[in-house]
Image (cartoon, rainbow, N blue to C red):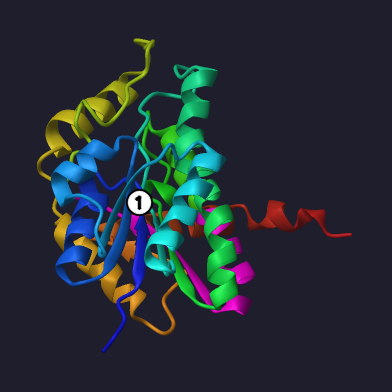
Amino acid sequence: METKKVWFVTGASKGLGFELVRKLLSQGFRVAATSRTVDALISSFGESSEHFLPLGMDITSNDDVKSSLAGTVAHFGAVDVIVNNAGYGQIGTLEELTDEEAKANFDVNVFGSLNVIRNAMPYLREQQSGNIFNISSIGGYAGNFPGWGIYCATKFAVAGFTEALAEEAKTFGVHATVVYPGYFRTDFLTQESAKTPAHTIAAYESARNSEQAHLNEINGNQPNDPVKAAEALIELSKQQHPPVHFLLGIETHEFLNSKMATLKKDAENWKSLTESTAI
């Protein structure tokens, strides 16, 4: 009988993480799910069992992450699939956001994921197998969203270190994939989830328009289903050669094509100056 893989999913109390854990448990996988408060996980999925391990974890604490992964392996005997899903959206222009606001977004979205990778790799490397899915965003390859610069920067970072991780880990039979979700109908854009700047500057009209559009118009009308996103991730985990880059959701190719067209246009228009440096 097939032994179901052990998944370690961060940010599992809502959104994509929640739907992924629910789908995994329904299919008989073993799941360690983390959230800042363990009560939310227990109320949604139940107490600890042979198939489920709820973990209260501060992703910004390396020691806490290390303990959670050790607890997962102690409970299930292994860990096979890592999903770095925990994160939040920080709205605000680069001028508006304070040093503390910017660093806090990086602490969760970037350094939190690095804490997980750092402490998961010894297990995956030893067993010579595994998958790591790092959840980025469409804002991780297209940053032309006014008022979302810091958030996009964190997701660009996720894409960058995943590319490196894919090269570092493949020798050990471990696959790393950066996932770029488009707009999914979750609570990501609600007032409770997306953080707005403590101090705003009235002159940034385009940023305010973008903020209001995301919070009031796009929120609740996103064209993608998070349940189907969960199914896609499970399917990827079964592939012998999963991609390093994975676009998730309709309309994501439009963002990709637009970015590539912009890069190509700038490269061609400025080619003579680009190559003026030759010795």
Q: Residue furthest bottom?
A: 1
Q: Does residue 211 sit above or below 154 in this rendering?
A: above
Residue 188 appears in the figure: no
Q: Residue furthest right?
A: 279
Residue holding disc 1: 138
Residue 77, image quadrant: bottom left
Q: Position of residue 193 (x, y in %)?
A: 26, 31
- Number of marks drawn: 1
Q: Position of residue 255 (x, y in %)?
A: 33, 55
Is residue 97 on the magenta stretch?
Answer: no
The N terminus appears in which quarter of the rendering?
bottom left
Q: Does residue 54 sit above or below 247 in this rendering?
A: above
Q: Residue furthest left?
A: 221
Q: Which residues are magenta?
A: 159-184
Is residue 172 on the magenta stretch?
Answer: yes
Q: Position of residue 102 (x, y in %)?
A: 49, 26
Q: Position of residue 8 (x, y in %)?
A: 37, 58
Q: Residues within 10 Å of mark 1 (few under 14, many from 20)?
A: many
Residue 12 appears in the figure: yes
The foreground one among 5 and 11 is 5
Residue 186, image quadrant: top left
Check disc 1 and give the amino acid type.
Ile
The C terminus appears in which quarter of the rendering?
bottom right
Task: Kindly identify the residue that appears in the image at 23 percent across and 62 percent down.
Answer: 230
Q: Is residue 20 left or right of residue 260?
A: left
Q: Does residue 89 sit above or below 179 in this rendering?
A: above
The foreground one among 267 and 104 is 104
Task: Kindly identify the residue that appears in the image at 13 percent across and 53 percent down.
Answer: 223
Task: Kindly identify the residue that appears in the image at 37 percent across and 44 percent down.
Answer: 86
- Indicate the secondary structure of the residue bearing disc 1: helix
The foreground one among 67 and 216 is 67
Task: Kindly identify the residue that appears in the image at 40 percent across and 40 percent down.
Answer: 57
